[in-house]
Amino acid sequence: MARRSDARRSDARRIGMLGGTFDPVHIGHLRSAVEVAELMALDELRLIPSARPPHRGEPQVRAVDRLAMVELAVAGVSPLRVDDRELKRDKPSYSIDTLESLRAELAAEDQLFLILGWDAFCGLPGWHRWDELLQHCHILVLQRPDADSDAPESLRNLLAARSISDPLALEGPAGQISFIWQTPLAVSATQIRSLLASGKSVRYLVPDTVLAYIHAHGLYRDAN
């Protein structure tokens, strides 16, 4: 695991934002979140469940259940916390809206980091108002050491102009892109739902509190 950063500290806060359907939240999400929070010395890393993701199908379980599972998963784990603002909107979960909302609550000098997986980052040109994201945040891309794909042509000029090789060297409240190399755990929400639908165990793939909630509420019994 990457060592904790001894980067300069100031009065500016450092806030991370990790969105997703979390259908359900699992150890892959949580381990990545903890590693990024420690590496970047974040004051908070907010897990933000999406209500109606515009680039994916509808989540299998209700928002209230997905929110409850994330809350159980991060309870007592500093600096992780849950932010439910996207679930309160009666419209698709656009990241630009979330960033604008969150930025409005922060001091001008606070650093805001949008955390994305490589696949999500490569799909940015299809996002709503994607070219405005860096006005509000830095982007941290979680990249696998064995990844061999290139960024799409539509992102190459942006990367050339805005990328910083060392994520600990990101300066100012927003505007730059950097990569964090991780070896992800081989687990996915799709895999977990499939196992549960077939009556198999998902012990150790999700926190025990999340597993207990899934069983208590009879979630994911039907195949996708």
Image (cartoon, grey):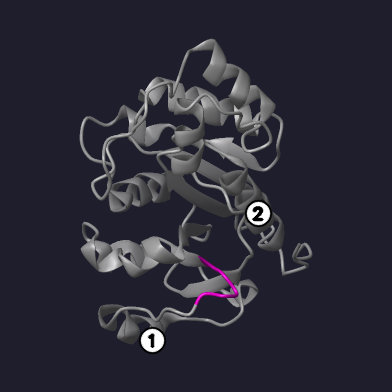
Q: Which residue is mark 1?
A: 161
Identify the residue at image location x=41%, y=46%: 102
Where's residue 82, x and y in %?
53, 34
What range is drawn magenta here? 142-147
**Three-letter code for the amino acid on which mark 1 is drawn:** Ala
Q: Residues within 10 Å of mark 1 (few under 14, many from 20)?
A: few
Is residue 173 something one can see in this rendering? no
Residue 43 left/right relative to 161: right
Give the image quarter of residue 157.
bottom left
Q: Position of residue 31 (x, y in %)?
A: 65, 49
Question: Magenta stretch mostly in which secondary structure?
Answer: loop
Residue 93 visible? The answer is yes
In the picture, the quarter occupied by the N terminus is: bottom right
Q: Quadrant of residue 124?
A: bottom left
Helix, strand or loop status at disc 1: helix
Pointer 1 with pointer 2, Cβ within 8 A: no
* Residue 161: % across, % down: 38, 86
> 35 or 109, which is in the foreground?
35
Image quadrant occupied by the C terminus: top left
Q: Which mark is residue 66?
A: none
Kind of residue at disc 2:
Ala
Question: Which residue has dot 2 on it?
Answer: 37
The residue drawn where x is 30% and y is 79% is 152
Q: Is residue 163 magenta?
A: no
Indicate the position of residue 202 as horizontal and vertical percent values: 60, 32
